[in-house]
Each structure stands twice: as structure tokens, then as C-alpha cells.
Image: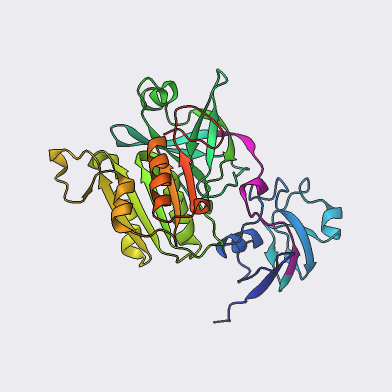
Amino acid sequence: MAPVASFRVTLQPSGHVFTTDGNESVLQAALDAGLTLPYGCRNGACGACKGKVVDGLVDHGLAQEQALSTADRAGGLALFCCAKPLSDLVLECREVGTAKDIPVKIMPCRVQKIERVADDVMVLSLKLPANERLQFLAGQYIEFMLKDGKRRAFSIANAPHDDGFLQLHVRLIADGEFTGHVFGGMKEKDILRFQGPYGSFFLREESTKPMILLAGGTGFAPIKALVEHAIHNHITRPMEIYWGARNRAGLYLPDVPMRWAEAHDNIRYVPVLSEAIPQDSWQGRAGLVHRAVLEDHADLSAYQVYACGAPAMIDAARAEFAARGLPAEEFFADAFTFASQPEVAVP
């Protein structure tokens, strides 16, 4: 069997380096290596991933003329979503480091799947147009644009590397017009419009600190995205996931964090119920979920905390964790409210 080729790709001006066997696009190889390059469609049509080949050769693949002209190619440009290395490469391109590096877009989507995972929680899978992708950071959210001009915001529950669909966790809100529609009238193949991504709730990958990931109810959605992203990018910092709900049914995807903890030595999962009912036969932790963190940690000065849930939970955790030594700049939060406001998601 012939040996598999291995090409070294160097990005400028960052100096980041990764290797690839040349069987996947430059973009995909970079994403697999934990580096985030800008992109839009992933199929050579939009030009968002365009960059310069400073040194080396690429196969341009399915790059379309309107996105990469003959003059572009002659000038050494390539679309990294479909270009594949034919040699070692030095590339000049912008890298996505923060939320401000990602353009906010208005996009249509189709409801691909509606799955009821609890009496009051629905998991929506949204299919994007075939020629488009939404670039986002794990933990960010989108806003649905309703016909009456109102907006409703929901956190994205899947990680960016798995972007063929967008997954949302929707809790039924009493007298909630949009969530009532999700539970009572929405059908598969319905078309919606949204804008995004938004939010500053995303993983700070430059840190080496252990993480506490605190979720209340459907606040698990962006926490799920953060953990999936960390696993995909081989981030081995200790992660302690505390997921709180009233009763066992509120932990609506119980097997997901359990599988993470079983498969990864750096992940610990602590479910907490505040109002367990007899049918739950609950033998686990009880009380408020942020208090479970305090029971386990006398000193939080060395930690980062990512918290998502109701404002009361966020406010209590912020104050009480600070009293245990958590630096204010290491507390990252996404508070769920019932109004669409900047950097706020609706449960």
C-alpha cells in the first residue's frame, strides 16, 4: 500500500500550522485542527472563505466562477472550502477569533424534524439552504424573525463542526405565542426566517483553567454545544457539568452528558433536581443547581464558569461564586428571559 501523503499548511499572519493528507478541503482540515477560518456556504459559491496561496499548489475543486474568477486564480487566490492541497502550503487568510469576526446573516430554514423530549421541551432540527451555511461559535444564538416584526431568540445546541442542521431546544412557555406554535401548530417542512449568530457566550479556548458548566433547564442547549465543540477540538481541560431541573423529566436528554462522562476522563456530570417527585425515585443531588457547585468547591479562584439558565440562577451564581474566589472576568453567562434582547436567549 502506498504511503499516505501528508502536507503541512501554515497560516499567515497567525503562524498557525496544521497537517492534512490532502483528501479534504483546506477549510475542513483547519476546522478539524481546531482553527476557525471564515466561511459561508462550504461549496464554492459565496467567496467568504477566499484567501491567498502564498506558496504551494492547490486543486481548486468545485470553486464557482462568480466566487473565484480566472483573475482571482491568476492572482493566487483560492476558496478554502473546496481547495485541496497538492503540496505543503503557506496561506494568507483571516482567522475567526471572536464573535465580532463572524458576519450576522438573515437566512431561511426548513423545519426538518420536531422531537418532543419532555412534556414541555421540543428539540427542533432546522435545515439550511443547500448552498449556504451559518458560521457560528459554540454557545451563540439565533433570532427568529416573526411576521409581526417580533423576534424570538434561541441558543444553538449543536457545535459548529456539525452545521448541516441547527438544533434548538424549545421549552413551552405559558401564553407564549411562538412556543405555543412550536408545540401546537408547527409542522415539518415549515419555512422560517432567522438572523444570527449573536452572543458573547462561547468557549474561551486560550485558557487552560478547569471549567464548571452550569445549566438550568433548557440552558443545557448552549452548554451541549460548548462540550461537543471541546470534545471535537480535543480540549482536555477538566469540565464539570452541573445540570439542574425541577424533576427528572426536566433532564430531557439524560444520556447525552452521561455518555460524555463515561467516554472522557476529564468530564464529570452532576445532575441536580430541586423538586423531585416520588415517581422520580431520585437518589441523586437535590436543591438548587448552583448550590451543588458550592457544596463541591470551597475555592473557585482557579476556575472558569459558563452558566446558562434563568436570570435568578445566573445572578445567584455570579454573586455566590465570586464570594468563593471566582474572578469576575471568568464568569460567562447567558441568561434566558422572555423578551428578545441583545445577547439574551429565550428558553
In depth, the one of 321 and 72 nearer the eye is 321
**In the drawing, does residue 223 fall left or right of residue 71?**
left
Whether residue 114 is visible, yes or no, is no
Residue 72, placed above or below residue 309: below
User: Would you identify the image quadrant in which residue 16 lies?
Assistant: bottom right
Residue 99 within the segment the image draws in magenta: yes
Whether residue 204 is visible, yes or no, is yes
Task: Tell which residue pokes out farthest to the front in this image.
Answer: 323
Residue plotted at (16% across, 50% down)? 283
Residue 326, placed above or below residue 134: below
Task: Tell which residue pokes out farthest to the top in this image.
Answer: 148
Residue 161 within the segment the image draws in magenta: no
**In the drawing, does residue 137 fall left or right of residue 231?**
right
Q: Position of residue 21 (x, y in %)?
A: 60, 71
Q: How is the protein colored in the picture?
A: rainbow
In depth, the one of 210 and 49 nearer the eye is 210
Residue 311, placed above or below residue 14: above
Q: Position of residue 64 (x, y in %)?
A: 74, 49
**In the drawing, does residue 336 fall left or right of residue 141?**
left
Q: Position of residue 1 (x, y in %)?
A: 54, 82
Residue plotted at (35% across, 67% down)? 265
Numbered range of the magenta stretch: 90-109
**In the drawing, does residue 96 fall left or right of residue 277?**
right
In depth, the one of 68 and 61 nearer the eye is 68
